[in-house]
């Protein structure tokens, strides 16, 4: 448990970073939602603010004056127990409240929260809600970047977000198979006072067989080999659902790849670039990760294998797909109430990703962090680390 | 045929009015497309401009410098023979080009066209293209207003567009059935040099039986009677397609009507108002117009009946649904090329509307004007005039 | 009005013919519904029987013992005011009642009705219901044949229905344009005591301009020319809805045409045959009829033109698409109650077809008969007669 | 590995049982496919036969005369590498081949296979294909029963399949929590020569924490408590996907439950019965199993837990949902070719079920058997065993 002072600093730093992320945008960029799983940037700005207002100020600040009664309706997300919400596919249809108005809302709530923290004795329970609110906003910082990439990267003009944004750090060391002994290991977050999400808690034993895991992420060049060998055309490499998906969506390459006059380009946050063969592959679905591994006659690691082995390699550039379907850890108990709905959401049909990415907010991820997405999604900076 | 000077004035006046219509908007309002048949205001701004660039400047102005090569792709609409286009449902996903950039585009093209018209001998054919371009923009002015109403009227905050906008002019004269003798009449636009669309041309004879037509539009109060009598629940009043539509869309009232604490309100361009019982009904589908007439044991007029009788009543407040399905007039010939595609589009499954509305651009409609929409659409200012 | 005796004979003859149509079928053929607008043959057998039970026996025969209470639920069609029904798309999911059981039902109702007619004084109103019931069954005889063709013609084994069934009568006379003077004509059924549907009634005047109409139907050879000239690829020939339809359904030829090793074959009720170039074209949608006419620089006749000219040419092989959208005749009044729902159904988005076809039941059609279908449907024996 | 003679007997016994299962059916029952995941009984009859023809007779019997070339097209299922197939949703549209013709096909192939086995030296590889073919048919025997239940149980007449079929064996012993020590255990099929599917192979170690598992299945009465307590209305008990599913499908009870005049009935293979409160619950989805466990403040076992504990309780009445998503065992290798496609299909988004059911074919299941279905499916005899 961090002290309130430390959290206050983290809070202010986080609020500021969210707005810095949005600085390069035009007003129009804040508004659109080209696909259901992407949210308009202005919604992220409002939603992260609403969280502090709803769970701290409304409940604990005496005589708190709500900024706008209707915002709860507009900026709630999936917390079905807190009240009616604008359904997700409608978020991109809302031109109001305007971006300026949402910035006023942010300022109002930030200042009210600072005042509240300074003037009150903060209970441990409230401290925890504050921490979750901060990390919730950090999570949305990554979504902001990936949603912005989707919005600009699906515009026919392909505008750059920020010329200086560097998505790719080339791994220069030579390839090696790291070997892990069979045996009983422990995974999950130890109780060390550091913040973590509920789903990481409950450190517990697992048995793993001997396995080998790569010390490098798969590169664009390696994936191109798979493509050139007809990987997308070989039904035997794909799950049935995956085959339907690549057929109906006409998937033939990772997201943001463009074949122009016979050469591969990649849309990045710094604009359209010639594909760098040595850069770590990004923006592939679990299905593609699986088919690639199948083609190599290898496999993806389980999340337990990944966590056990992770000290031996660098990670944090790409969210690494694992073979594990998301499922609560043994003896997991869902917290009560709306925060529980946020933190203890049941997940089905989702695959766990481990690590972090170039878009992950500073101080947000850790080696026990369990990210999860449906197996067909690829607008996050997802990548592949092979095992065998 | 109007002279070039007259058209030049009309051109400038029209360009200006389009921008005046947009003045009350926030930047964010220009971007969204809440439903497929509504276009973002910035698309209307660009598309009407593209028309002049594509069909006049590109083809006839020597050394014309295109403003932006990619705009043809973004702002083309359904002219399938002119090249690839951004599909309609995607228009609301495009944050770029920005609104400011589109205003620059408008200025550039307007100035280039003025220069072109001033410095060249204009052929009659080109004069006609210019006229169509102007009326095309006038048509989009009405769509702009109705699309803006849809965008703001489907926002949970229900913001007003313009406090002073008056949608309703109450018809104060007493109700009367106008009687028309049976016989052979002529309908269609006479060749009098005045501008009209191709589909009005070819004045021709029709035979009509004796009929009666109302001298007033149906009011909100009359329609409420139908609602209160269970009109939306009586399957025998509705077309099969209509019944499926009101069931699946849960239609229980005209668009923009809200039942709040037991009283009916109406969202208007000047904001949410208590429903005025005496105002002419607006925003109903053909299906609703038909069911209402059926319930009254009356019917809608055909377009021929409407045109024959129209001198005897005031019109222009509401687009009046007729019983006639849109179909070309006898001996109609579709013009050639892309302009033909615009002007001579084949229509099926659409009902003709006659008259005009409070949102129709000045000098745009006339008694032979044939508007048409699918029978379930109701975001235009549509209304009912009964016949029997 | 025909006497009861005459109607009794027509009734028995009609009941028998329905069963004769089904004789060549296997039990399995009675069950399936490959597409929503096709009904399983056993449903037709039951539904036509249910009509007599529901509207005559149940209401007028004292102490009538209903055959099976649940059949009303299974065999009702779209008469929404008579009670719950098995939704149309579910008809093909019902293996019970068995075919044998339905034949028992037919026998039971036929015998009960004969007894009822023999032993009672029949009012004129009841006589009319009887007549409608007979013609209703005749209508279903044509649907039976076309539904059977769809069921067998979409089976990969392409089994023949009846080797001796001849779909095509070649028109051997030379082509000629029949000329019709402009002027006021009368159309609609005269009140001559002959049976007709309500929608033909109300003989009334129409004005037509001078026009020319073909004395022959379009042949397969003529349509092949259109196909070979790229008709299905030229967007300018098609309605917008039609273009979406041929694109999404991948329509490239009339229904039942198969290109096998470079030659065109046609599935017919007598099996797969080499396409006969001289036979009248069949199984095209209104959209295709329109595009073909457009390509020929001609048009389809209106229904008034067709009716005025029909004495001058042979008809009855193909239902001939007209340009007219279905709409009630002037002063049409919908009958009351469930029979009214059957007979006075409101139609929208449907095009009128005139004439009749090789599948039409004997004594069923006439020159004032108004058939109608949605413009994309083509499983009926539809064809083209050009006008200009 | 069983000897050929033993397999020959098992083969004949299996072929016979399939046909016995179909004896109570009417011809019409063989044809329909009310929903995509159900296949028409005649398809099962043909498909299981096609397997032996395709993988044994065609490949290994010299001069084998194929029964009908087109059957490969009609009766292939998802073996995408063997050639074009009738898509699954179309199976119910095919009235031909007739049931009689398929029985001839069965006889032909059964006799040809017996002759082949009697007259040839059978390699071990072929022996394995034969065994898989037999177990493949056994699997389809269970699907036949559950598909028949779906077909008859969704017919408004609710006909019984077989009056003597008993679905429910009441567990009379008292309830107890079985306790399992934490530690390393082994799961998966040992190499003992007994037949098993590839996905059970690779016996391997797992670590489990201490847990408790019920010695009884959940009963109808217990589930009714959950329903009466508002279980289907409490969003916090359900996965997000589950909530969408129960909302859009209007799920309010297990499949085949009917509320008639205030009492619960259950459609069973022996017809409609009053719900037996003591019978083990059947026909629930994983989502419902999970929500029920959540409401009890317990959970479902993992498949490892189930396998470790199974010796201590009776199983085989219901397929028991586990919390485990299906995933290949460590070091699993997919077999090559079309048989590999059958046996080594990659699965995603499916939950493992363990045990067996009253519809499972004799000698078909075992304690290591891994069944799997999408979490919303419930037409199998699925049930719940709680753990904590």
Image: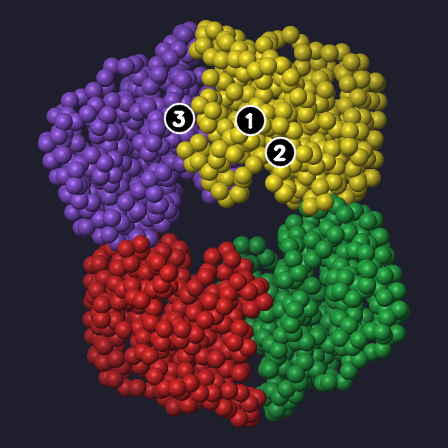
Chain colours: A red, B purple, C yellow, D green
Q: Residue at x 62, y 78 (%)?
A: D333
Do the residues bearing badges 2 and 1 touch, measured as CB atoms within 8 Å? no
- Give the number of the disc on residue C222: 1
Q: Quadrant of residue C192?
A: top right
Identify residue for label 3.
B352
Identify residue for label 2.
C379
Residue D225, position as x, y percentages in the image: 63, 66
In space, the residues marked 3 and 2 are separated at their CA atoms by 29 Å
Co-location on one chain, circles 3 and 2: no
- Give the number of the disc on residue A250: none
* A64 in relation to C138, above or below: below
Q: Judge from the rendering whether residue D352 lies leftward or rightward of residue C326; answer left or right.
A: right
Q: Residue at x 29, y 58 (%)?
A: A158
Q: Quadrant of residue D141?
A: bottom right
Specify which label sits upstream in the sequence, 2 or 1.
1
Q: Nearer the viewer, mark 1 or mark 3?
A: 1
Is residue A239 in view from this perspective? no
* A51 in relation to C181, above or below: below
Do the residues bearing badges 3 and 2 touch, measured as CB atoms within 8 Å? no
Residue B350, position as x, y percentages in the image: 43, 30
Q: Residues within 10 Å of mark 1 (few under 14, many from 20)?
A: some
Chain containing the residue with disc 3: B
Q: Judge from the rendering whether residue D233 lies leftward or rightward of residue A149; answer left or right.
A: right
Q: Residue at x 71, y 41 (%)?
A: C158
Q: Residues within 10 Å of mark 3 (few under 14, many from 20)?
A: many
Q: Quadrant of residue B64?
A: top left
Residue D360, position as x, y percentages in the image: 76, 68
């Amino acid at each position: 448990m961090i002290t309130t002072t430390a959290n206050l600093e983290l809070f202010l730093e986080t609020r500021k970073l969210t707005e810095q992320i949005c600085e390069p945008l035009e007003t129009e960029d804040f508004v659109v939602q080209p696909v259901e799983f992407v949210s308009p940037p202005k919604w992220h700005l409002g939603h992260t603010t609403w969280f502090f207002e709803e769970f701290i100020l409304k409940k604990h600040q005496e005589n708190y004056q709500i900024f706008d009664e209707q915002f709860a309706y507009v900026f709630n997300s999936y917390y079905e127990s807190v009240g009616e919400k604008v359904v997700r596919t409608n978020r991109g249809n809302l031109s109001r409240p305007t971006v300026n108005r949402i910035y006023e809302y942010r300022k109002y709530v930030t200042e009210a929260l600072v005042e509240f923290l300074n003037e009150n004795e903060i209970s441990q329970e409230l401290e925890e809600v504050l921490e979750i609110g901060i990390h919730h906003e950090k999570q949305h910082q990554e979504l902001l970047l990936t949603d912005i990439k989707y919005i600009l990267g699906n515009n026919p003009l392909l505008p750059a977000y920020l010329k200086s944004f560097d998505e790719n750090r080339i791994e220069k060391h030579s390839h090696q198979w790291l070997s892990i002994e069979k045996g009983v290991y422990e995974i999950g977050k130890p109780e060390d006072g550091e913040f973590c999400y509920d789903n990481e808690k409950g450190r517990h034993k697992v048995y793993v067989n001997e396995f080998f895991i790569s010390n490098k992420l798969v590169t664009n060049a390696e994936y191109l080999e798979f493509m050139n060998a007809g990987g997308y055309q070989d039904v035997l490499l794909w799950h049935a659902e995956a085959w339907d998906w690549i057929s109906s969506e006409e998937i033939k390459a990772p997201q943001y790849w463009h074949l122009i006059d016979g050469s591969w380009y990649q849309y990045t946050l710094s604009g359209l670039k010639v594909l760098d063969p040595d850069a770590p592959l990004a923006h592939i679905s679990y299905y593609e990760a699986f088919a690639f591994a199948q083609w190599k006659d290898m496999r993806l690691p389980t999340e337990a294998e990944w966590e056990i082995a992770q000290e031996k390699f660098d990670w944090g550039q790409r969210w690494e797909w694992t073979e594990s379907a998301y499922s609560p850890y043994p003896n997991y108990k869902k917290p009560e109430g709306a925060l529980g709905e946020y933190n203890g959401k049941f997940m089905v049909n989702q695959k766990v990703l481990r690590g972090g990415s170039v878009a992950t907010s500073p101080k947000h991820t850790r080696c026990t962090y369990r990210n999860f997405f449906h197996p067909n999604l690829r607008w996050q900076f997802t990548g592949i680390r092979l095992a065998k």
